[in-house]
Image (spheres, helix red, strand yellow):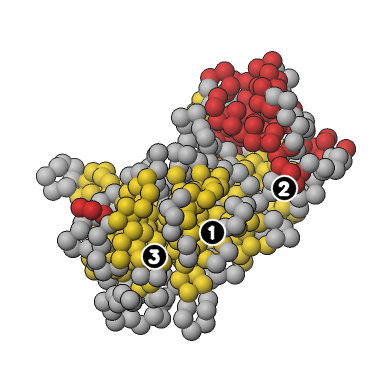
Amino acid sequence: MTFALPSFPSTSKMFGKRTIRPLGAAALCGIAFIKDTLIAIDTAKGHLLQIDPDSDNTKILNPHQVREFMDVRGLAVWEDTLWVTRGNNVYLCKLGSFGLEHFVTLPYPADGIAVWDSTVYVSCQKLGDILIFDRDTRRQITKFYAPGVGVENLVVDEETLWVSDTLEQTVYCIDRGTGEVQFSVLTPFDSPTGITIHKDGETGTKTLYVAYASEEPYVRDNPNADPSHELSYRDRTFIHPLNYHYNPDKRYALSNGYLVEMSYMEEISPLEEVYLPDVEWRIALPSETARQKVKHVEPIGLPFTEEVIEGQRVAVFKFDALTPGERHIFGWKAVLEVRGIKYRITPSDVENISELSPEFQGRYLVDDDDLAMDTTIVRRAAREAIGTETNLLRKMYGIRNYVYDELSYGIKPHIDTPDVVLERGVGSCGEYVGVLLALCRLNDIPCRTVGRYKCPPYAEYQQVPLQPDFNHVWLEFYIPGFGWLPMESNPDDIGNGGPYPTRFFMGLCWYHIEIGKGISFETLTSKGLRLTKEDISIGELAINHIRFMILQELPPL
């Protein structure tokens, strides 16, 4: 028996190229395709929705069984059977009847579900496993370790099990026979809550689709209040195609990207008027990396010349003198292609790495940035963070988790040294980086500061000026034979003592803008001498203005 879904008129011109925002949906979880028709569960309302991917039109398929489908978290379709998870239970039913039949009960809540022939896969965050059952006997065959720490949803395609993880902001590609992770990709949005695959009937092309569900803040116009504008929250749920490109030789996968325009500008506005002769003002330019391509750079306000410092492009603005009362606006504007990147390197891959060169040791294992590496508290932390571990990658995991255990995030007007930060137990992103750098270098792991800004992560706000509230820094660590790998400073520190996500451990999302790797972002010289904070700080001389504009989503690689 074949179940026939009601048809929608469809143009299919934008199929696989647009964000799907189903009308009337509040919180989508499990999703699945039946040919070109998308079905999804709105877990907040209990609606099993049929969705037209081209028009966002929706129909409720279970108008008389809404209560039975409340709080359903996972959904799968195999032939004419619908499978769902709710509470600790897994259910199945025939498409069209929606009378749920019990399949199996887990000791803890069941999350995602996928079915391939006679094999049923069920994820359980509380167990930390993906359980595998035989459909006919209803007995558990085996289990795999869940790759992430959040709630996971599943879809199977032939020999591949795809797993989306809500906290990890990641989709994992897993061998469904062995449970081994082949690679993983970062999703362009946070809180992925469902995953499915669409196969084009004509070309055979397969596209991953990911559902997202969260709340977003917005400014509400309340006519009964004075002032009338107030902060409120609303549901945010949608489905978006996930693009990826896996490079097995370089051990990374790229995901959805955007064409972004970034402007960085300084406005001379000193707190106290000064005279500075023969000034050179250097501002680092965006870097060229595996995930970031510089398409165009142009000056703002005043012309600049370019220098290359340690492989990084730097804009140099020259002034005969900066005199009292003199005002200028100057900077650069760049157009960038930026994508998500996630490396897949395991501890076993780094068991027999080569020794560091003396040049690397002298550059990246020393205290060259007020890291307080000779203080008792920092040295003790460096020992405690790794214990007896000798594997470089496991040491990095240990150091990161130790810092997350010891610190909580808080913004401060200035950066304190790692000894002060560890004593206080609270740090900004720059202070997290300082502590991580100190502990890594004391444990013979080369590392350097990277950053400077993140584009506000609102990919749907295209052709609209966006201003970040703060600058941001993270770090890179070096593995001989593999190169420099990124690691975020604090965003994966979600508190509660772990386990912590590893979404930004060897990974960056599209909104990270890499500028001036391993060099100072901005420096000032007068008569050839570099000015320090003790002489005069850039913040006392000028106000910076940063603006982003997301121009468009990039096509798949």
Where disc 3 sits, the SS reads: strand
Q: Counting residues from the N terminus, which is met first, the one under dot 3 or under dot 1?
A: 3
Q: Using the image, tell me which numbered label, if any, was put on residue 161.
A: 1
**Residue that badge 3 annotates:** 77
Question: How far apart are the alpha carbons under marks 3 and 1?
Answer: 15 Å
Question: How far apart are the alpha carbons under marks 2 and 3?
Answer: 42 Å
Please state which amino acid type lies under the numbered disc 3: Val
**Residue that badge 2 annotates:** 484
In this rendering, is residue 495 above or below 327? above
Q: Position of residue 105 (x, y in %)?
A: 37, 45
In this rendering, is residue 443 above or below 452? above
Q: Quadrant of the C terminus?
A: bottom right
Q: Counting residues from the N terminus, which is met first, the one under dot 2 or under dot 1?
A: 1
Number of callouts = 3
Q: Position of residue 500 (x, y in %)?
A: 53, 37
Question: How far apart are the alpha carbons under marks 2 and 1?
Answer: 30 Å
Tell me which residue sits at (69%, 46%) in the image. 346
In this rendering, is residue 155 above or below 489? below
Q: Nearer the viewer, mark 2 or mark 3?
A: 3
